Image (spheres, rainbow, N blue to C red):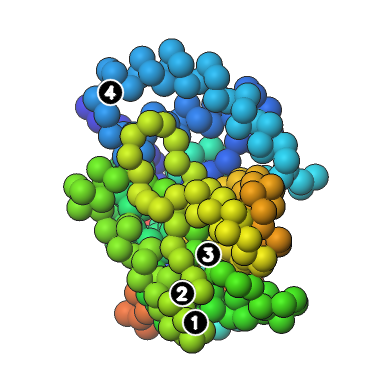
Amino acid sequence: MPSFSAELPHDHAKPERIGVLITNLGTPDAPTTAATRRYLAEFLADPRVIELPRWIWRIILHGVILRTRPSRSARAYTEVWTPEGSPLLIHSNAIARGLERRWQERHPNRVAVALGMRYGRPSIADALHELRRLGAGERILALPLYPHYSGATVGSTFDRITQVLRRWRRVPAFRFVDHYHDHPLWIEAIAESIRKSRLEGKPPDRLLFSFHGLPKRYLDAGDPYHCECHKTARLVAERLGLESDTWQVAFQSRVGRGEWLRPWTDEVLRRWGEKGIDRVDVICPGFAADCLETLEEIALRERDAFLSHGGGELRYIPALNADGIHIEALGQLVESAIPDWLATSRSDPQALAASLDRARTLGAKS
């Protein structure tokens, strides 16, 4: 017989809380080869990430990739690791705590927040169990920190959440934010971060919107990621009143030999450098929190490549992280998805006391 996780004792006098699960990709526990190998083994084993026949991919993954790539990745993580740990985890935690403070101010004791990583720790399973421990296990909304939908990110997150929830005896009411690439307040947050950057120095000659790459065959199979990235860039450019020849979209972080979405960030920056373009700003709107791909790949490696090819200055515009306008955008995004839950959440002390009395007459202990 299948076994289901035991429920915590129900407290009839405890206010009903709404659970908000914040998720992000994940990070190794440390910038070491061993920790990076564990992380990559979990990440690259996901069939949503690598859509190849499992038996073929297992041979490649364990026979080649996990023997060579972890040491290179660990060296890259060392470049951005802080005394407090992984930048991605630090910023993701700050976002979750910022949202928690926002809702505590506006909806006291009505919303509980937990952070879970798709790969690594804290896990999605840990975060879901934390919500249940906090009395927020009956109504849960998941917010993956991916503005643009892709099966490799948002789809994989959905898979993992539902994999955990289907083992719960009491399955919660569940809602899921699958993208927010064109949410007006989020678009304004991106635009405002660009405005602030331009106040700190001379206006750039070019602005590059760099998004994480994706195999082209995923686009051909119907993944909307490519289109959503272009829409984000267009809406931000319109908000800023940018001329069409001053900005461009490109895709970074490609791996392997297959065809990936074009144009590629590294090629665009090298070409701009060779043309003698003096100042370039790069922003990565697809990353809610700064991480290896923004801090090491763009702010360090691609900056050096641009300069070495003749470019003058490359400024990386940081991710929104826990900036106030970002927290407000995400907060409104969640609230727009659960207005009925916020309106009906049981929190009145007298009603809770009456509920407890009724429960005790039926034999409940709490």
> Circle 1: is it few (<14), some (14-19), or many (20+) Cα within 10 Å?
few
**Position in image of residue 93 (x %, y %):** 62, 57
Provide the residue designation for mark 1.
Answer: 242
Provide the residue designation for mark 2.
Answer: 245
Residues at discs 4 and 2 in contact (Cβ within 8 Å): no
The answer for how far apart the CA atoms under marks 1 and 3 are is 12 Å
Drawn side of residue 226 relative to residue 130, left or right: left
Extreme-front residue of the structure: 275
**Position in image of residue 241 (x %, y %):** 49, 86
Residues at discs 1 and 3 in contact (Cβ within 8 Å): no
Provide the residue designation for mark 3.
Answer: 208
Query: Label 4 sits on what residue type?
Result: Arg
Occupied quadrant, residue 334: bottom left
Q: Secondary structure at mark 2?
A: helix
Q: Secondary structure at mark 3?
A: strand
Residues at discs 2 and 3 in contact (Cβ within 8 Å): no
Query: Label 2 sits on what residue type?
Result: Asp
Earlier-in-chain disc, 2 versus 3: 3
